[in-house]
């Protein structure tokens, strides 16, 4: 990768049209000042005083945040939230991002807004300390009519897209946006448009997903291949290659500090190392930054190796952002690759 090649690839980002289909949640950070700790008169237990509340889109929204930070021109949001206060905050956070289109994002009384509430102790001179998280999720099946609305939106958008990402974040199958119906619809769309760049990621693993581009970690690859972890490097390459051949689409496997392996349907397998750590780190959001950069770079004409290199650089940017689910812009990526470049 050279500065000129980076410019050539990223100059195409503003013209890209990308849809993010998946579980958009609200990341709500409660910033606690430990100097203001009190004790409850009624219970005798400590009282943590929240001095600031931050809200941003999380889960599939973290991928969207990274796509917006990269300067992707048109970003279609496909999913839903509840008709509640968290849903209001989530919609406001999404609408504030440049290039975002919310026509495919529905508010419904049949779902509550998926929320991660993160109490965060901020003490001068120390890294932020996250306390026990408070989650709000849906535990009942997504209503069929709502599934059909999401699927219809995917079909409607498909002809105008350069790339499609499917992000399944829920713990219980069929309770979120990416149900069996929506997965099948994404597969139909991808099958009808072989040149469409696609990428799927799932918290529960990608078993049962159609032939899309896959992104996963080594443990998820082992589960999908039906073999016990941990996988040796040669095993990662072998199983990733077999999966890419079966899908007819690229497969990317993240290996933490060892970087990332990418396998193509043509039988090629490559590994790109992670960048060295430069200080304290917070790994939250790194995987979503990888997904966003892989998808965008490939849609802009990058080779798989170039896309993986950019993804690893973006991950390095994000893990050094403490106490937040961070993003990586093109300028930040360039600065890590060429610290002395003043452009």
Image (cartoon, helix red, strand yellow):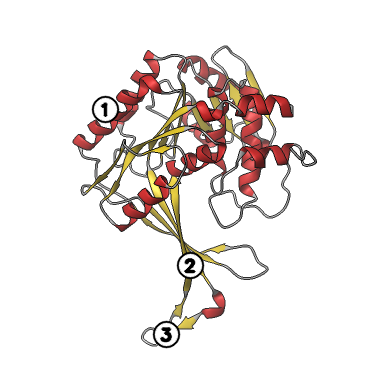
Which residue carries the number 1 mark? 152
Residue 220 rendering spot, x and y as whole percentages: 50, 34
Residue that lies at the very extreme toward the bottom in this rendered image: 41
Determine whether 238 is above or below 281 in the image.
Answer: above
Q: Is residue 275 visible?
A: no
Residue 257 rendering spot, x and y as whole percentages: 67, 40
- Secondary structure under tag 1 reads helix
Per the rendering, the mark at residue 76 is: none
* Left or right side of 321 for 139: left
Per the rendering, the mark at residue 52 is: 2
Q: Residue at 41% x, 29% y: name it.
A: 207
| CB under 8 Å between discs 3 and 2 | no
Dot 3 or dot 1: first in sequence order is: 3
Determine whether 202 is above or below 327 in the image.
Answer: above
- In this view of the protein, which residue sits in the foreground, 247 or 334? 334
* Left or right side of 201 for 84: left
Question: Gap between marks 2 and 1, in whole Å?
Answer: 40 Å
Per the rendering, the mark at residue 44 is: 3
Q: Which mark's residue is nearer the viewer, 3 or 1?
A: 1
Determine whether 182 is above or below 25 in the image.
Answer: above
Q: Quadrant of the N terminus?
A: top right
Q: Residue at 51% x, 33% y: name it.
A: 72
Residue 286 rendering spot, x and y as whole percentages: 57, 43
Within 10 angstroms of label 1, few (less than 14), some, or many (20 or more) residues? Answer: some
- Secondary structure under tag 3 reads loop
Residue 340 rendering spot, x and y as whole percentages: 80, 41
Question: Gap between marks 3 and 1, in whole Å?
Answer: 54 Å
Q: Quadrant of the C terminus?
A: top right
Q: Is residue 90 visible?
A: yes
- In this view of the protein, which residue sits in the foreground, 207 or 79? 79
């Amino acid at each position: 990768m050279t500065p000129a090649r980076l410019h050539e690839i990223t100059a195409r980002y503003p013209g890209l049209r990308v849809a993010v289909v998946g579980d958009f949640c609200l990341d709500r950070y409660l910033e606690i000042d430990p100097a203001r700790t009190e004790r409850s008169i009624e219970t005798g237990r400590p009282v943590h005083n929240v001095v600031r509340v931050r809200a941003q889109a999380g889960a599939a929204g973290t991928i969207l945040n990274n796509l917006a930070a990269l300067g992707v021109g048109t970003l279609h949001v496909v999913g839903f939230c509840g008709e509640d206060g968290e849903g209001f905050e989530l919609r406001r956070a999404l609408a504030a991002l440049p290039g975002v289109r919310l026509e495919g994002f529905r508010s419904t009384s049949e779902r509550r807004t998926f929320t991660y509430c993160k109490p965060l102790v901020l003490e001068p001179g120390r890294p932020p300390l996250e306390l026990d998280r408070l989650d709000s999720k849906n535990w009942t099946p997504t209503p069929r009519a709502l599934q059909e609305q999401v699927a219809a939106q995917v079909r409607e958008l498909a002809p105008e897209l350069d790339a499609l990402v499917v992000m399944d974040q829920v713990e219980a199958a069929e309770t979120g946006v990416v149900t069996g119906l929506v997965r099948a619809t994404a597969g139909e769309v991808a099958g009808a448009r072989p040149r469409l760049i696609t990428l799927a990621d799932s918290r529960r693993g990608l078993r049962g997903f159609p032939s899309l581009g896959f992104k996963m970690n080594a443990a998820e690859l082992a589960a999908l291949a039906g073999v016990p972890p941990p996988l040796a490097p040669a095993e990662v390459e072998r199983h990733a290659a077999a999966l890419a051949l079966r899908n007819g689409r690229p497969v990317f496997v993240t290996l933490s500090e060892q970087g990332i392996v990418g396998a193509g349907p043509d039988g090629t397998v490559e590994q790109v190392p992670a960048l060295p750590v430069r200080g304290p780190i917070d790994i939250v959001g790194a995987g979503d930054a990888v997904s966003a950069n892989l998808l965008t770079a490939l849609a802009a004409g990058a080779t798989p190796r170039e896309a993986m290199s950019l993804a690893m650089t973006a991950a390095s940017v994000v893990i050094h952002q403490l106490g937040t689910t961070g993003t990586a812009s093109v300028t930040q990526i360039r600065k890590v690759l060429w610290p002395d470049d003043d452009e």
